[in-house]
Image: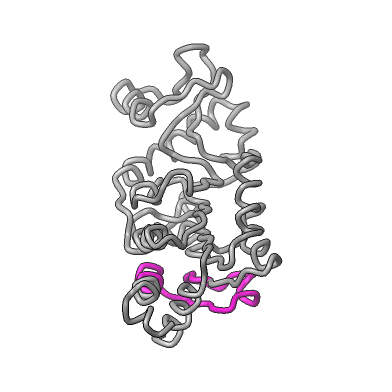
Amino acid sequence: MEKLIKKGADMIKKANSILVFTGAGISTESGIPDFRSPGGIWSKYDPSDFYFQRIISDEKAREKYWKMSSEYWEGMRDAKPNRGHLAIKKLEDAGKLLAVVTQNIDRLHHKAGNSPEKIIELHGTAFSVSCLSCGKKYDRDEIERRIKEEGIKVPYCDECGGILKPDTISFGQALPQDKLNLAFEYASICDLCIVLGSSLVVYPAASVPSHAVQHGAKLIIINRDPTPFDGDAELVIHESISKAFGDMVDLALSKEGNSNA
């Protein structure tokens, strides 16, 4: 493992424009369950119940959606960034970070201190709620208060009575094209792409790292399980992200690491 960490640190030292791509695996060490693992969200719920079309067309589906979403809200709201998130902030502080493209909705990159303009949330955020009709935005805690204290099972918009939904991307809902375009733009100009905690099976987001490779970037993947893109990576580590990536960044940015450059 030490050799792999050293190799990754060398790659980080030589890079000037690093694109970090994060998935649920970076946040599990902050206590946020992922969706697909045993014990994850989809082991308790049927994902087909939460397709966007069902949410907007079926009151019962909306009730089930809010039950699921509220169940995980407090844990996500109170979660703290771990060493993996903080290592990305160190890359920004060192002037090496181009952007963070994340599939996560947990705002942990913001909590870690990364500049908001450098964070591209492809799958949206759980921290705000919007009316699907008039677009009015609500703070998530306000909507959760109505559900808990007032016993409301399905919240609706105060202004127009429209359907309210957290600002996350559901199955069957299009990703925001402007964010996707920006992610691909950064992928085309970065010199190193680092994937942290993503299985790289959810498209179109998973195309971002391969786009980087196609445009000449080197690729590092740190993920618990193998991914379809492991063969494209110059370095693959199946290990704890906070440990492996934290050590890698610390070594890359240390005086000792820099003296070996």
Q: Is residue 239 magenta?
A: yes
Q: Is residue 255 above or below residue 174?
A: below
Residue 99 appearing in the image = yes
Residue 28, horizontal then vertical, whole percent: 39, 59
Residue 58, horizontal then vertical, whole percent: 59, 27
Left-right relation of 48 to 121:
right
Q: Is residue 247 above or below residue 80?
A: below
Point 53% across, 71% down: residue: 221
Residue 138, horizontal then vertical, whole percent: 42, 25
Residue 240 appearing in the image = no
Point 42% across, 36% down: residue: 67
Q: Is residue 172 above or below residue 40?
A: above
Point 62% across, 33% down: residue: 54
Tell me where residue 116 sits by quadrant.
Answer: top left
Q: Nearer the viewer, residue 8 or 125?
A: 8
Q: Nearer the viewer, residue 193 or 138?
A: 193
Segment colored magenta: 221-246
Q: Is residue 126 magenta?
A: no
